[in-house]
Amino acid sequence: MPSPVDNLTDALLGPILAADPAGPRITYYDDASGERIELSASTLMNWAAKTANMVVDEFSLDPGAKVAVLLPAHWQSVAVLLGVWWAGCEVVLSPDSDTELAFVTEDRLVDVTDVPEVAALSLDAFGKGLSDLPIGVADYATSIRVHGDQFRSAGAGSALEGRSVAETIRAATVTSTARELTSVDRVLSSQSWGSAQELIDGLLAVFAAGASLVQVAHPDAEATARRVGTEKITKQF
């Protein structure tokens, strides 16, 4: 088995799984649709394993391959990111000529026309897939179902936009330390994950501290105020 520093997913979730596998790790709200879903570390790892198996078995990627993740701050995006890292691949947030696979929402298919392999996500709360996708584009919601929920990492190259696993962990730890995050914190955020630094600050720093994230899309002020109490929020970004 690789050491934690060899794989970002193991490094982030390994300690959490050892300490609290069943507790809420990410709670996702969309105040426009009324959606709410909560996932434990164990459930996240199951999703990550399915995604990693998809990356390796369906798209035949090797560790070190570049994978573009063009997704919003959403619980399914967490599953994709963790799966890509578990497969040993590097996440990039905009595709380049070396990008081998892209995970995108349907509206961003135009941004990945030159990427050899593409998987599109509906982000539907009930797992509904996408219809009428272009030929050669995989529907994540449909494809992910056939992949196993166990995975053994084969190592990794860079983790995020050229940063190594160790460098990414250090950057996340800098943020978590600056914000005085601990494993007992419940963090409320509506921040974007559109850049590497935003992703580090808004997601990875929370997991690096062993904390729990409540991520809100289209936040409503009144709902947010109530949520501080109902979700036992200790920190807000």
Image (tube, rainbow, N blue to C red):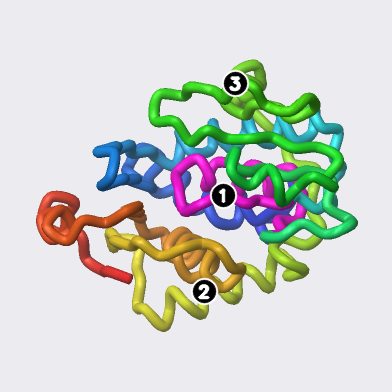
Q: What separation in Å lies between label 3 and label 2 (alpha carbons)? A: 41 Å
Q: Residue furthest top?
A: 146
Which three-letter amino acid code belongs to the residue tagged 2? Answer: Thr
Q: What separation in Å lies between label 1 and label 2 (alpha carbons)? A: 23 Å
Does the CB distance between marks 3 and 2 fall below 8 Å? no
Identify the magenta region.
68-92
Q: Residue furthest bottom?
A: 178
* Residue that badge 3 annotates: 131
Q: Position of residue 5 (x, y in %)?
A: 69, 61
Q: Quadrant of residue 209?
A: bottom left
> What is the secondary structure assignment of the residue under circle 1?
loop
Which three-letter amino acid code belongs to the residue tagged 1? Answer: Leu
Q: Position of residue 213 (x, y in %)?
A: 35, 55
Badge 1 or badge 2: first in the primary sequence: 1
Which three-letter amino acid code belongs to the residue tagged 3? Answer: Ser
Disc number at residue 173?
A: 2
Which callout, 3 or 1, points to the residue nearer the camera?
3
Which callout, 3 or 2, points to the residue nearer the camera?
3
Q: Quadrant of residue 53?
A: top right
Q: Position of residue 64 (x, y in %)?
A: 84, 53
Q: Residue at x 65, y 16 (%)?
A: 146
Q: Residue at x 27, y 69 (%)?
A: 236
Screen quadrant of the C terminus? bottom left
Question: Which of these two is toward me, 211 or 213?
Answer: 213
Q: Is residue 77 left or right of residue 29?
A: right
Question: Which of these two is toward me, 219 or 153?
Answer: 219
Q: Position of residue 175 (x, y in %)?
A: 47, 77
Disc number at residue 71?
A: 1
